[in-house]
Structure formats: C-alpha cells, structure tokens
Amino acid sequence: MTSGIPGLPDLDAPDGDLHFLLGVLFNQQIRAETAWKAPVRLAERLGSLDVDDLAAADPAVLVTVMRERPAIHPFAVAMSARVIGICARLVDHYSARAANVWADHPTAGALHSRLTGFPGIGTHKANVAVALLTREYGLPIVGSTAATAAALRACPRLSEVLVT
C-alpha cells in the first residue's frame, strides 16, 4: 500500500510497516518530511531495521548511531529509548510486526488505544497515524472520521497533504 504523500513508506515493502510506525514516533519537533526519512536513515546506518534486534539494542549504541551527523533526530536519547520500547512492544504483543497493530482492521478507537500504548506516541500522533492509515493508505477503519478531524484541528498543514 502506497501513499500519495512524498516520503511516506510503502506499507507492503519490507519493513514499510515499521518505517511507518517509527516515522509516527519521529514526527516530533522536526519537519514531517525529515521524520518520514528518519527510519530509512536509521536502517542505512544499522544495515537493516530488525524489530528483534532493535528491541534488544544497547541504548548507548543506538544513541551514538542516531547522533551521527547528520543527526537522525535532535532528541537522540529519548528517541533511542522509544525505538527500543516500540520494538519490544511489537515483539511482546504483535509478533514483531508493526502491521499487526492494524491488520485486523480495528475500530479507530481500538487502533488509537493500541498506538498510544507505544512509548512516545500520544493522542496527537495516534490521531495523525489513524488519519494517514485511512485517508492515505485506504485502510478500512471504522470511526476514523473523529480521529482524522482531531488530527486536522491540531495540525492544519495535514489537510494540505491528505487525499480528499
């Protein structure tokens, strides 16, 4: 599944689902375009993005990798811990696959709850993720209108890029 927004990952590509989830995480106090590129840059530096490896990663090593110039994110310490936490949660609850978070076509409320269960993903990021998964990727998520509306209110620029 692809999106019309430049930089958003193809969900069907290898690790595209993880790239999406980490892009949601990284979308904090940096340009969205930079946030969506961050998982690709992390994969390039690590050689791959393996959920099991990231879940067991040494936080200090990951911080060092994220701080290499150009830095992947200005908050390398916090984001490294969150990447490890997200991957650990994927291993523990979603068979190490980010796509399993939404693969059973949950309601928007259930998906929102699942997303906010990940470190570093609060209400706003979850609303944006639901909006993108439904409007850009066409996932059938019942009740997504309210989450999309909330995301658009909080982030008016999102309306410029979402498919209508």
Image: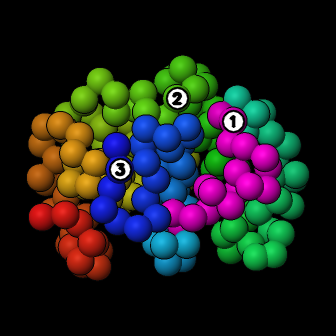
Q: Are marks 1 and 3 in contact (CB under 8 Å)?
A: no
Q: Which mark is residue 97?
A: 2
Task: Determine whether 117 is above or below 125 in the image.
Answer: above
Residue found at x 61% / y 55%:
39
Q: Amino acid at mark 1?
A: Asp
Q: Which residues are magenta?
A: 35-51
In three-dimensional space, the C-alpha distance between marks 2 and 1, rounded to whole angstroms, equals 10 Å
Which of the two discs, 3 and 2, sits closer to the camera?
Answer: 3
Task: Determine whether 71 is above or below 103 in the image.
Answer: below
Tell me which numbered mark, 3 or 2, is placed earlier along the sequence. Answer: 3
Residue found at x 68% / y 42%:
49
In three-dimensional space, the C-alpha distance between marks 3 and 2, rounded to whole angstroms, equals 18 Å
Q: Which mark is residue 50?
A: 1
46 drawn magenta: yes
Q: Which residue is more in the foreground, 56 or 139?
A: 139
Left/right placement of residue 46 relative to residue 104 reads right
Tell me which numbered mark, 2 or 1, is placed earlier along the sequence. Answer: 1
| Residue 104, x across and y down, in percent | 29, 24
66 drawn magenta: no
Q: Which mark is residue 122?
A: none
Q: Is residue 109 visible?
A: no
Q: Which mark is residue 2?
A: 3
Residue found at x 23% / y 66%:
162
Q: Are marks 3 and 2 in contact (CB under 8 Å)?
A: no
Tell me which numbered mark, 1 or 3, is placed earlier along the sequence. Answer: 3
Q: Quadrant of residue 75?
A: bottom right
Q: Amino acid at mark 3?
A: Thr
Left/right placement of residue 34 relative to residue 41 reads left
